[in-house]
Image (cartoon, coloured by chain):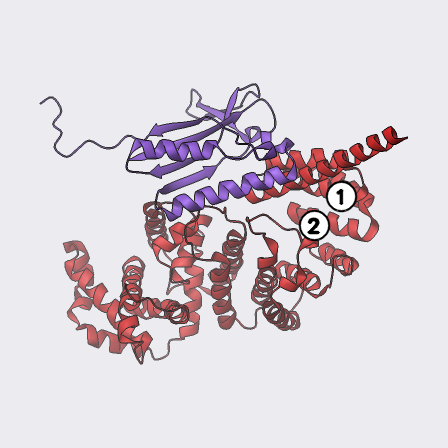
Chain colours: A purple, B red
Amino acid sequence: MKYMLLMNVPGGGPYQIAGWAAADITAHIAFMRGFVEKLAAAGELVWTGGLSGPDQAKRVRAGADGAPLVDDVFPEAKEFLAGYWIVDVETPERAYAIAAEASAAPGPGGRPLNLTIEVRQEMSGPPTDWTPGA
Amino acid sequence: MIPRLDDSAQDVLRDLAPGVLCALMRRYRDFGGCEDAVQEALLAAAMKWPAQGMPDNPKGWLITVATRRLTDQIRADTARRLREHLVVSLIPAEDQIALAADAAGVDERDETLDLYFMCCHPALSQPSQIALTLRVMGGLTTGQIARAFLVPERTMAQRLTRAKQTIESAGRTFPDVTAQDRAIRLPSVLKVLYLIFSEGNTASDGDGLSRVDLSTEAIRVARLLCGLLPDHAEVGGLLALMLLTDARRSARTGVNGELIPLDEQARSRWNQERIAEGKQVLGRALVQGTGGPYQVQAAIAALHAEAPSIEATDWPQILALYDALRVDDNPMAQLSRAIALAMVNGPAAGLAALDDLARDSRLATHHRLQASRAHLLERAGHHAQAIDAYRCAAQRTTNASERNYLLLRAARLSDSLSRTELTTVSGRNAN
């Protein structure tokens, strides 16, 4: 089963770790790196990505002629998606455990951040023996 | 466990790949089919050679296997393709090899060169040129290329298939590349190799997946090109630039993949072998002609490589080289020039140059401009402004290790500022 784990961080300003002490930033980066390496070594990591800051974000809609209408994202957005992991695991409980580990990433003073990690299961294709309407 | 080819055998194998493709294309011309057959032959070699040992004539072995795969493919193919290749497929594979190997009057060197030019066909997008060069000239598998660029294998396979189709439908390919095509395409070939090299240096890290090393790969393929075009100053310039830049690689990142800037690098960790080779290649290129952008950048890299410290670097000479580079149309080189200017005439001069550059719309909001400003502000002692500039640059960059570096730089400065304030306050209290 594949799950997407989304890490949302408070928005409305510069990326929050910008205000931390150097030692805390270093510990946070080392944690994130080790976390991904461990998932990959366990064969559970499908993909991961860190997203660039809110300043770079755009909202795009198709205009009347199909051409993109591009807007900046309003800075007062409450939360921002900072990064995600896609994991392939046996049970939902394992996905929750991984999410909890990510949530406890160290913050200022080395204290766990306890960020909310959104866990979403990726939908699979129809089973081979499925007959619609039967 | 399946025995694996050791690295040197893999290099032999992959060095042979372009020549094998040439031999096949000489007879069959069908680029897509020949290229697939060569890939299969390379895979077969990787499977069989570890157990059987490398054959006496590895290239002949690869040609035989690739030809067999190609003729099998042709036999199994649709009626349309059968009609096109009927004559060829009726000739026993062994005879075809004899014909292919007996390439009287064909200059193999020129043919291999033309493969480079074909991979950089102007009808292809740059990502396609890069992927095709890695596959055809580098002998990498689709899977290896896909992992190197962190895209799914299917995406890369599609990109390669489309690239081959584009080349076939655009016409004037191997073996019909003209002298004019070669002259026009050489800069694209050099650029593609440099992009592959740079990708290896800046690729996103931390995914924990094993990836081919693109910088090493680019150097290997540039070496091949240098062997084919030994008298070309810019080919030598490019190879020298790669070697001299690569020499600093292990000093450039810390244990957590964090960026270490030139002034903080442990110079004892620079690879002296690479530096010596880079300087030798550069010296030879300088005799052949001067002034090309790769050569000038290589000369700048050589000056850094020779310097015992950042202070003892020949900055006036580096500044002169940036001026020789005619940096006007290259915003990133303009930034580097401003830094060199600051090293020669002081941070204020550098900051003034950056202010001028901020009028360029390409640079005004670029994170590198802010990062350069931050460094010079720090050097000038304007710490609060430097912190703001570092953070601003960190928000704008899309490279994770650059962002981490900039955030840390701001944090360290901010930590030391608050320590200073504390000392001042406690000092006052004591009075």
Q: Nearer the viewer, mark 1 or mark 2?
A: 1
Q: Amino acid at mark 2?
A: Ser
For disc 2, the chain is B
Q: Position of residue B401 (x, y in %)?
A: 56, 44
Quadrant where the C terminus of chain B is found in the figure:
top right
Crowding near pointer 2: few (<14 within 10 Å), some, many (20+)? some
Respond whether the residues carrying marks 1 and 2 are from the same subunit. Answer: yes
Q: Nearer the viewer, residue B330 or B105?
A: B330
Establish if B392 lies above or below B243: above
Q: Report whether residue B347 is seen.
A: yes
| Residue B155 sits in quarter | top left
Q: Is residue B387 above or below residue B239?
A: above
N-term-proximal mark, 1 vs 2: 2
Q: CA distance from mark 1 to mark 2?
A: 12 Å
User: Residue B336's mark?
Assistant: 2
Q: Residues within 10 Å of mark 1 (few under 14, many from 20)?
A: many
Q: Of the numbered discs in the image, which one, if any, rests on residue B376?
A: 1
Q: SS at mark 1?
A: helix
Residue B417 image label: none
- The amino acid on which the numbered mark 1 sits, given as a three-letter code, is Leu
Q: Residue at x 66, y 34 (%)?
A: B391
- The chain letter under disc 1 is B
- The residue tagged with tag 2: helix, strand or loop? helix
Does residue A73 appear to the left or right of B71 in the view shown?
A: right
Q: Which residue is more in the foreground, B158 or B292?
A: B158
Looking at the picture, tell me which residue is in the foreground, B291 or A75.
A75
